[in-house]
Amino acid sequence: MDPELIKDCVHCGFCLPTCPTYVLWGEEMDSPRGRIHLMGQHVEGTPVTGAMAGHFDACLGCMACVTACPSGVRYDRLIEQTRAVVEREHVRRPDERAIRALVFALFPYRRRLRAMRLPMRLIRRLQSFLEEVHPSLGAMAELAPAVPRPVRLPPLVRARRRRRARVGLLTGCVQGEFFPQVNAATARVLALEGCDVVIPPRQGCCGALSLHSGREDEAKRFARRTIETFERAGVDAVVVNAAGCGSSMKDYAEVLAGEPGWAARAEALRTRDLAEFLIELGPVAERRPLPLTVAYHDACHLAHAQGVRAQPRELLRAIPELELREIEESAICCGSAGTYNLLQPEAARELGDRKAERVLAAGADVLVSANPGCTMQIAAAVRRAGKGEIRVAHTAEVLDASLRGLEPGILGWSPRQG
C-alpha cells in the first residue's frame, strides 16, 4: 500500500454517494475513504485483521469513486495493492480458500470452461441444493447462461473493403466460451469497417480476474503471455470487447512496472475498447435502420476505469430508427465486478436486484452491455424479478445487426432462456 497515494485522500466524502456498498449499508468502513483509513492503519503497523479484510473484500473495485474524487486519489491502484497484501498476510477460512481456489482454477482457463459446457446444462436445476452447500456455489448456478452453440473463428478475418487497419481481437475467457457470438459480431463489424482482424488461436487469459483479486504473480504471468501473443500478431491495435479485460490490459505497464523491459513492451501495446476504436477510426459502412428502443448499461470498468462513456452511445445513436434510453443510477455497479458476484453473493444480489429494477423501468426492448459479467449478472436479476421482458445484447451485436440489415426481432437473447 503506497503511503503517498494514501495521503492524497482528504476524506471529503464526494465518493460516498457513488460507492455501491456505502449506498447499500451506510457504513463508513465500507466506503472508499473508510477503506483508505484502514489502509493507513496497516501502513502504520496494524496487522490485517479478519474485520479489516472483510471491508476490503466487500469493495467491488468498480472505480466509481475514482470518477467522483476531486483530489485525483488513485483508489484503483490502492485497492489492487491492498488486495495483494490481504492475499499474502490474511489467513482465510477453509471454505473461503476452497471457493477461491475453484474460481481461479476454472475461469481464467478456456479449456476448463469448455469442459463445463455439459455440466452447465444441468447446473441451474441444482441451484437450491448448491445454495445450501455454499452461497457461492448457488450464485454460480444462478448466473450460468444457457450454453451457446460453439463459434469457430478463423485466425484472420479479412477487411470487407479497402483495408484501413490491422487489429488483433482479444476473445477472452468468459466472453469466448459463454458469448462466442459477441466475438463473431465484433470481427464482422471490424471487417465491414475496413479492418483485417487477427484472432490468435491460442491466446490465454489477460489476467483481469487475477489482477482485481490481488493475485499479483498470476496476473503478471497472464499479462506477459498476452503481450507476447499480440506482439507476434503484428497489429496496429488490440481491440477488446469486454470492459474488465480492456481495463486490465491498459494497466499492463503499471502491473509490470518492476520489470522495465516488459513495462516498455506493455506501453507499446495499443489497447482499445471496441467502441473507442470504432469512433477513432470513423464509420464507412452503411448503417441500416433498427427500429428498437435500447437501454445502455455502463460497465464500471469501461465507464470509470477506462473513461469510455460517450463512444458507445455515439455508435448506437448513429443507427437509424434506434432510440437510446438512459438507465437511472447508471454509475452504480450492477454487482458483477469480476468475481465479486461469486465471492460476495449476498451483496451482489442486492445490487443486481437494484440494477434490474432500473433497467426494466427504462421500458426498452433491448439492454445493451459491453461486459459479459454484467450481462450475466443483470440477466439473473431480471429472471429473479419475474416481471417485464427485455432482451440482452452486446454493442457489437447491435452494430452487426444494423450493418448487415438483420431483423431487430432476432437481436440478443432473453434472460428467461438462461
Image: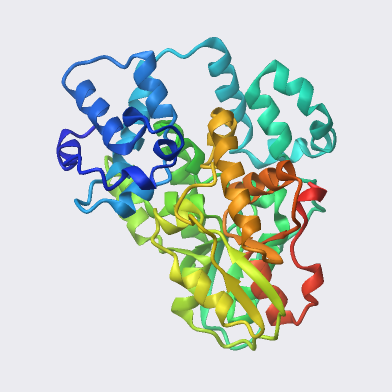
Residue 50 lies in quadrant: top left
Q: In the image, residue 84 lies at what x, y percent? A: 36, 28
The reply to whether residue 207 is visible in this rendering is no
Q: In the image, residue 367 lies at what x, y percent? A: 65, 61
Q: In the image, residue 26 lies at what x, y percent? A: 38, 33
Nearer to the camera, 387 or 145 = 387
Nearer to the camera, 314 or 266 = 314
Nearer to the camera, 222 or 81 = 81
Q: Does 112 sit left or right of 273 as displayed? A: right
Q: Is residue 128 above or below residue 335?
A: above
Nearer to the camera, 47 or 234 = 47
Q: Is residue 409 above or below residue 29?
A: below
Q: What colour scheme has been applied to the protein in the rendered image?
A: rainbow
Q: Does 287 sit left or right of 411 as displayed? A: left
Q: Is residue 4 above or below residue 394?
A: above
Q: Does 45 sit left or right of 19 as displayed? A: left
Q: Does 198 sit left or right of 273 as displayed? A: right
Q: In the image, residue 335 lies at what x, y percent? A: 54, 41
Q: Quadrant of the N terminus?
A: top left
Q: Residue at x 23, y 21 (%)?
A: 42
Q: Residue at x 77, y 74 (%)?
A: 408
The reply to whether residue 110 is visible in this rendering is yes
Q: Residue at x 16, y 41 (%)?
A: 10
